[in-house]
Image: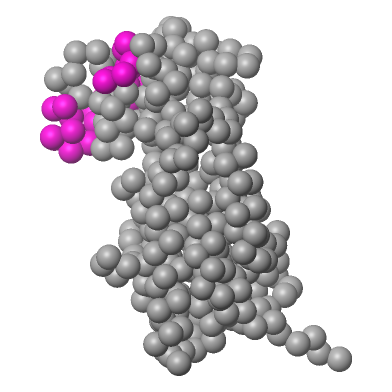
Amino acid sequence: MTESIERIKCLIIGSGPAGYTAAIYAARADMKPVIYTGMEPGGQLTTTTEVDNFPGYPEGIDGNQLMEDLKKQAERFDTDVRFGLVTAVDFASEVGGIHQVTIDNEKTVEAETVIVVTGATAKYLGLESEQRLKGGGVSACATCDGFFYRGQDVIVVGAGDTAAEEATYLANICNKVTMLVRKDFMKASKAMQKRVFNTKNIEVLFNTEIDEILGEQVVEGVRVKNNQNQETKVVPVTGVFIAIGHKPNTDIFKGILDMDETGYLITQAKSTKTNISGVFAAGDVQDKTYRQAVTAAGTGCMAALDAERYLGALE
């Protein structure tokens, strides 16, 4: 006997602040949302030890606990949170069409609306010490974690606008910022380079890469290598900020949803609407500018409201 295909009014692909906020709003609008969390329930915040900049937590909160709180709030309104990975999509092109989504290569569900909140993954260097010291001094977000290194010496790895922005932001709160640039030039815009070179407590080391991050539980320093003469030296720092870019988790949507050259989903101005009717995108998967938990949550709210209005217009 053929198993019947489940029909869902609002399917949310991915979790994190955007996904759970979308679920809260969708559930309160009686859209009976179903979330498939992906392989990292809670998203990037689950790798953060302490979150100090999310409203409502005056003493700060552990990233895992924050995501658990958001999940419980979504479930309080009867959101169906499921562990599973979306492996294929077949989105209907016409207004009011039913979208088909495959879970874990085996189960197919149908959805009247879909909210994509698959996020983006920070790029790292691939060092064992880097992975081991995530949350212990290694970060990919200065605006998230820079506060914890005020008055200290830190390193920023990268040569583009993001790295320059991170360095100048950290320079306002840290004692010294050392930028490591792999080549003999920066890729950042001229304006951003000018800001970097005009900031007295930023030092730029060209032709320089990380050889090893030192420390067992927390960062105690970095051994850097000049890739021209192979000379190494130790830079005593307590924080390392990797700013070599992010990769949006959008591979399964290629050729289906409009995206920019780096893979970020393109949404219509002042909305979360994609090029497919009934499919919406929120959070870091469509935001390469701010990438904050609170802005992701805000767009999650927008996506649920957009989905509710979309369904309302069909009635």
Query: Left or right: 191 with respect to 124?
Result: left
Question: Closer to the camera, 2 or 283?
Answer: 283
* x and y percentages locating residue 293 in the rendered image: 45, 45
Residue 11 in sight from this viewpoint: no
- Name the one closer to the observer, 25 or 137: 25
- Residue at figure coordinates x 39%, y 19% from the top left: 155
Tally of numbered discs:
0
What segment is highlighted magenta in the picture? 171-195
At a point 63% along the width and 69% down the height, the residue shown is 34
- The image quadrant that residue 33 belongs to is bottom right
Q: Height in image: 197 above or below 175?
A: below
Give the camera-side residue of 243 and 187.
243
Quadrant where the N terminus lies? bottom right
- The image quarter containing residue 185 is top left
**The C terminus: image quadrant:** bottom left
Q: Residue 72 location in percent, x, y?
A: 64, 53
Question: Does residue 229 belong to the magenta stretch?
Answer: no
Name above or below for residue 77 compared with residue 220. Answer: below
Could you tell me residue 44's position as x and y percent? 54, 43
Can residue 174 be seen in the rendering of this structure? yes
Which picture quadrant has residue 287? bottom left
**Magenta run includes residue 187:** yes
Residue at position x 26%, y 67% from top?
269
* Foreground of the two, 236 or 273: 273
**Farthest-out residue, right:** 1
Check the image and report above or below for 212 versus 160.
Answer: above
